[in-house]
Image (cartoon, grey):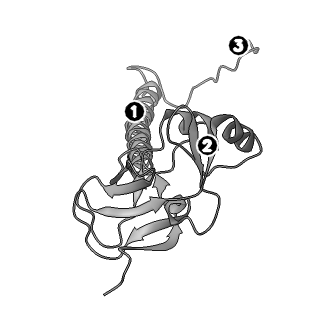
Amino acid sequence: MPSRVFRVGRSFTGLGLFATTEIKKGAFVVAYTGRRITNAEADELERRGNKYMFEVNKRCTIDGTSRKNLGRYVNHSCKPNCEAVYRRTGRMEFVAARNIEPDEELTIDYGKDYFALFLENGGCKCVPCRGKAARRKAAARKARNAGAKRSKGKASARKASARKTTARKRKPAAGKSATKRTSRRPGRQRA
């Protein structure tokens, strides 16, 4: 039996943590570890591009840059299956917010600040949002196709109507012969 309930694997958004066994609601998953720094230091590191910051409170932030910190591989989701819990011992832990199936990616909600800082420009790429975007795209495609079919149907009805009208115009009137027709072109007068 594996000692860890997760594995690091390739995710849609990069590397991520995936469950190897079923994880029950409320069970410990992984700890977010790293050196404790002030929020001012964290702001400076974020300006330089560091994304692995976990703000604990108004005074303290955990710098999770080290690859030994396996908690850094927990990705964002708008519908997360884990939540962050700060223990009295000063340890930040991720616990299961619901039952998690094997091979399901472990995710938390990063919060509004992270979303505004990193995700807003490119949009959220979590599974629920990608599914929502795909459904919207499919609905738009379906509406576009339905509109094209309707307009195609109207166009073919207009063509058929135009053919009937043209056919009526070609019928000779009573008492006139069909051979004596004169064409009227714009700009030409009849002789």
Mark 3 or mark 2: which comes first in sequence?
A: 2
Helix or strand or loop: what does disc 3 sit on? loop
- Label 1 neighbourhood size at 10 Å, few (<14), some (14-19), many (20+)? few
Q: CA distance from mark 3 to mark 2?
A: 68 Å
Mark 1 or mark 2: which comes first in sequence?
A: 2
Residue under the image location 58 percent in, 43 percent down: 61
Q: Quadrant of the N terminus?
A: bottom left
User: How many numbered discs sit on the rendered protein?
Assistant: 3
Which tag is nearer the camera, tag 3 or tag 1? 1
Helix or strand or loop: what does disc 2 sit on? loop
Q: CA distance from mark 3 to mark 1?
A: 37 Å
Q: Which residue was labeled with disc 1?
A: 154
The disc labelled 2 sits on which kind of residue? Gly
Helix or strand or loop: what does disc 1 sit on? helix
Which tag is nearer the camera, tag 1 or tag 2? 2
The disc labelled 1 sits on which kind of residue? Lys
The correct choice, above or below, for 69 with respect to 76 in the image is below
Residue 104 lies, in percent from the top left, at 35, 66
Write down the quadrant of residue 23 in the picture: bottom left
The disc labelled 3 sits on which kind of residue? Arg
Q: Is residue 121 visible?
A: no
Residue 59 lies, in percent from the top left, at 57, 34
